Amino acid sequence: MDYEVIFTNIHLYIEGLWVTIQLVFLSLVCGFVLALPIALLAICRSPWIQIFPKTYIYFFRGTPLLVQMFLIYHGMGQFEFVRESVIWIVFKEAYWCALIAFALNTAGYTAEILRGTIEQTPFGDFEAARACGMSKSTMYRRIILPGTFRRALPAYGNETIFMLHGSALAGVVTIVDLFGAAKVVNSRHFVPFESFITAGFFYFCLTFIIVSLFKKLEFRWNAHLRPRKV
Amino acid sequence: MFDLHGYFPMILQGMILTIEVALLSLLIAIILGLIGALSKLSKSQIARSSANIYTTLIRGIPDLVLMTIIYYGGQIQLNNIGDFFGWDYIDISPFIAGTLTIGFIFGAYMTETFRGGILAVSKGEIEAAHAFGMNRWKVFVHITMPLMVRHSLPGFGNNWMVLSKSTALVSVIGLHDMVYNAGVAGGATRQPFTFYLVVAMLFLVITGVSDFGLRWANRRFSVGVRRA
């Protein structure tokens, strides 16, 4: 056991930690923005509209994140028109490729969570909103979606943790995130056990911070579901 | 675009390996899950807290990191122990490391699923079995287990779906599964997108077939349940 090396390289881990947090946060935000319209399309009654969001969700939930990331990182270079257009600036950077893959992936999962929760909205909510004379958009904006976000919170917390764990894949495509930092330390000093355990420790702490954050959010937003104090 | 230049058999070979890893690790996960669930529900404080540590640790660390810890780190630790006892050099193959890690990770998720399933078995059934003079082992094998299956099937199915996709990670530690082979074929033909897309489709086939099988199992195990 040689933890001296870890302490001399701790700055690498700290930088990696920052990259991981960035990646997870940005992909969650982008993923959520994407997921909302997908979920709303998926609850449309028309089978012709439903087919697009359903296929999207099916593809991104049915294939591994690693393959999705490779499709974008390694795969995009296959096409001449991508390499010659302006968007190649984006696709030649590992960071953006990973971010796009993560965002698309989490959008699929989040859309499925939102779709499920919207469909479970009690019918009375719709009825009451309509009885108040709300238009469809007002009804969704003021009644259905706020209720949905509340009820989706526990499942979304799990998705956040899955995204954090999935983000370790960024280390595979040369990005120096937490896992990437562990890889760098290992290749420089050959301390496989110590270097990866340290990364694991950081991930573990991050997971617990996220869990407690979501507990706080649930405590606040789902106050009406709290067991009553006697 | 779908000219595979004769690399398809290689991808299929990788798919067989992927399925092997998935099924073997599922077996490990089921065994660990049962042990974990029973320890979580046992009266012994030591069993309960060790199961709790197991599930929290596993669920807090990404699977990729755990896999590298076991594959790279486990090798060295094992040989350190081996040196102490005077064993020969032990080589953990990526297959064993990958299978063990995935089994170990999903054992933690199975623990929670099975624990929920066991708790959902109604108390009357267990009491009735005890009243028939069955001992605890017999009650578990003949009553709790079969009834638990139905309650844990949905969670079990979810775990299996996530597990089968996690097997893609073994390509990172150098196992020649279908993702790895697609990388080789894609590099050789300069068509990585095509090959990774094929692999993605094959994963959809695996999940599609499992979904079908799980639905069948769900019907089979819920025969005695009335539905509105």
Image (tube, rainbow, N blue to C red):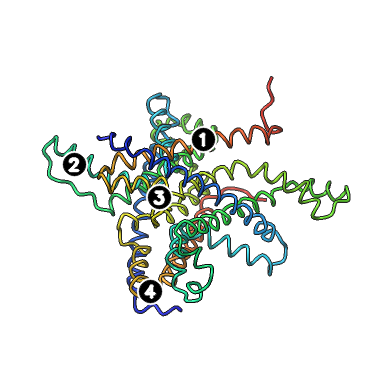
Residue drawn 63% across the image and 36% down it: A217
Residue located beneath label 1 in the image: A209
**Alpha-carbon span between mark 3 and mark 1:** 22 Å
Q: Quadrant of the C terminus of chain A?
A: top right
Residue that sits furthest to the top in the current view? A230
Image coordinates for residue B130, horizontal then vertical, percent: 46, 30
**Alpha-carbon span between mark 3 and mark 2:** 30 Å
Residue located beneath label 3 in the image: A176
Chain ID at mark 1:
A
Question: Which quadrant would residue B187 be assigned to in this image?
Answer: bottom left
Image coordinates for residue A72, horizontal then vertical, percent: 47, 64
Res. B79 mark: 2
- Dot 4, crowdedness within 10 Å: few (<14), some or many (≥20)? some
Question: Which quadrant would residue A224 be assigned to in this image?
Answer: top right
Whether callout 3 and callout 2 share a subunit is answered no
- Dot 3, crowdedness within 10 Å: few (<14), some or many (≥20)? many
Q: Which of the pair B119/B82 is nearer the observer? A: B82
Chain ID at mark 4:
B
Residue drawn 72% across the image and 44% down it: A147
Three-letter residue code for mark 4: Arg
Query: What SS does tag 2 mark?
Result: helix
Residue drawn 34% across the image and 78% down it: B6
Image coordinates for residue A174, horizontal then vertical, percent: 38, 55
